[in-house]
Amino acid sequence: MLDPRTIKNKLLKLFKNYWRKNILHKIELCFVILVILIVGLIYGIGQWYIYSQRNQPYKLGVSFIPDYASSLGLNPKQTMTALLNIGVKNFRLTSYWSDLEPSKNNYDFSSLDWQFSLAQKYHAKILLVVGLRQPRWPECHPPSWTLNQPTSVWEKELYTFMAKTINRYKNSPSLSAYQLENEYFLKGFGDCTNFSRSRLIYEYNLIKKLDPNHPIIVGRSNNALGIPLGQPQPNEFSISIYKRVWDANITHRYLEYPYPNWFYSFLAGVQEIFLHKNMIIGEMQAEAWPPNYKTIPETSLAEQNKSMNATRLKNRFSFAKSTGMHSIYFWGAEYWYYRKEILHDPSLWNVAKTEFK
């Protein structure tokens, strides 16, 4: 076996021989060294962040959207109750403008009311998403009566609606925080056309004015890229993590994102160092991604298993925890119940039950 000194000498000799050849080799060698240094820095900051957060308790939760549960053929109240009964105590809920103000000045908060009531009954906490852009396609959810209005008009209508929503729920014992919009600047996904930073800032200030007692979270606008600079600067930022999706544009096959856990730890660590802001996982992919723009009910169970099965779901829980971020909301809880109730496959549900208990 070679001793460390011999290995060192051989590497130095190899380096010198390569360096002496020509200018192209020098450039290549400098590039390789630069890449190694950058990856080493990313890994080091990621490991520092994981270590710094090691004593923080985990807060696991789920996103829950009644409209999505209904689209899967489920009873929304039954679905949320079932999630509460397996130990889910943190919910990320939506306030779709299109649902809650279907016609001008005609408000219907009945759906969100029963979600808050049910959460309070089970002593669960709610992260309430407010604003125009919210989780699930088409991402932006304006009511039909605003579609032909100029921006200056519908923005004021949106602010009025947001104020109504915030004032209605700000005193609920179940409310823990607000999420302002959802991946606001992500232009490549969703049926959204307005990305005005001034609107985002106004909405942020509106929430702070109406309810200064609850923190505000703003989501980063990409699975891996993007820097959360500029205004507004919320109490916390969130990030979405997707692992396996269908690439409908180039390869037309399933794509596994290659980012390791410590890459997301690095993003959270850099944010902690320079912005002094905590990062949470606002969406951890935990449901199937159907191919060719199909819906879940249009996709066979065998095909669904190619992007999400029990083993993958268990790995999602482990991966999320391994990033060092301790507040984690899983994406697709309605889907777990759909697999159990509609497809008679309780495998995902059983994994979730174990993790939340």
Image (cartoon, grey):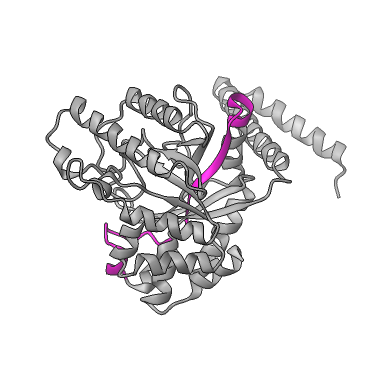
* 65 left or right, relative to 107: right
Q: Residue at x 29, y 50 (%)?
A: 137
Percent x, y of residue 173: 52, 48
Q: Residue at x 14, y 32 (%)?
A: 149
Percent x, y of residue 162: 33, 37
Q: Residue at x 32, y 26 (%)?
A: 199
Where does the magenta region start and end? 270-299
Task: Please check the rendered image and state whether residue 155 is part of the magenta-colored stretch, yes or no.
Answer: no
Of 132 and 281, nearer the camera is 132
Q: Examine the rendered structure and indicate whether residue 68 appears above or below residue 4.
A: below
Q: Farthest residue in the left direction?
A: 148
Percent x, y of residue 30: 61, 24
Q: Residue at x 55, y 42 (%)?
A: 280
Of 304 and 178, nearer the camera is 178
* 104 left or right, relative to 71: left
Of 218 and 283, nearer the camera is 218
Percent x, y of residue 107: 25, 46
- Is there any visible trace of residue 16 in the rendered image? yes
Quarter containing the C terminus:
bottom right
* 82 left or right, relative to 29: left
